[in-house]
Amino acid sequence: MRAKKLEQKIEQEFHVSWYIVAYKLIFGLAELLTGIGIVFFGSQIFRLYTRLVSQELSEDPHDLLARLSERIVPHLFTHHTYLVMYLILLGTVKIAGAIGLMYKKNWGVDLLVGLSIILLPFQLASFFSHPNVFDAGYAVLGIFIIFYLTEFRPHAWISRLLLYRRAKK
């Protein structure tokens, strides 16, 4: 009973930004479709890539972009199973969290905040290893989404999670 009252109180105070819902839904759908696309069209994409790179290198053997991609892309296709699992899982979680936000469910907030917190160290490591504007913007946007979804009170959000968990027991 206490858990139900707590849930109702949280629902009354809940706020949702449609920008965050759209952002998470669009990127989740893009990641999911990319993962599925690699499953079905991965070998065709790799053949196209090798043909285009060999054509580019035959025209200019010192092409910087082709040389850089030769170091990265073959490794992606070697370990594509992990990449596919990661993209499909990440896309599905983002879509589920966005749907939870649309219906103003607490688990949607918890799912997206938890996912953002888990991914934040990787985003920051990526930024610090190769600083650029896009990684900085992506990390700052992730931090802003965490704070917005927790109503700029992450301590209160963590307390709510712990209190809700104790109330269920």
Image (spheres, rainbow, N blue to C red):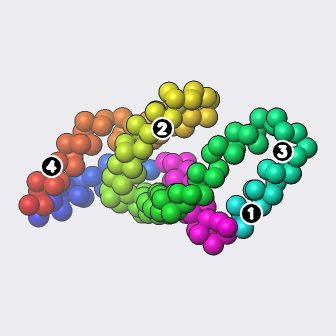
Q: Nearer the viewer, residue 120 or 58?
A: 58
Q: Which mark is residue 57?
A: 3
Amino acid under disc 1: Arg
- How many labels, in total? 4
- Tell whether 167 sits left or right of 139: left
- Quadrant of the rendered image containing residue 159: top left
Spatial separation of the CA atoms under disc 4 and disc 1? 54 Å
Spatial separation of the CA atoms under disc 1 and disc 3? 15 Å
User: Is label 2 or label 3 in front?
Assistant: 3
Amino acid under disc 2: Gln
Q: Find disc 4 in the rendering and name its residue.
A: 163
x and y percentages locating residue 137 in the rendered image: 57, 33
x and y percentages locating residue 131 in the rendered image: 57, 27
User: Is label 2 or label 4 in front?
Assistant: 2
Amino acid under disc 3: Leu
Q: Quadrant of the C terminus?
A: bottom left
The structure residue drawn at horizontal position 84% and vertical position 39%, both measured from the top left corner, is 61
Extent of the magenta region: 17-43
Spatial separation of the CA atoms under disc 4 and disc 3? 61 Å
- Secondary structure of residue under mark 1: helix
Q: Find disc 1 in the rendering and name its residue.
A: 47
- Tell whether 59 sits left or right of 168: right
Q: Find disc 2 in the rendering and name its residue.
A: 123
The structure residue drawn at horizontal position 53% and vertical position 57%, both measured from the top left corner, is 79
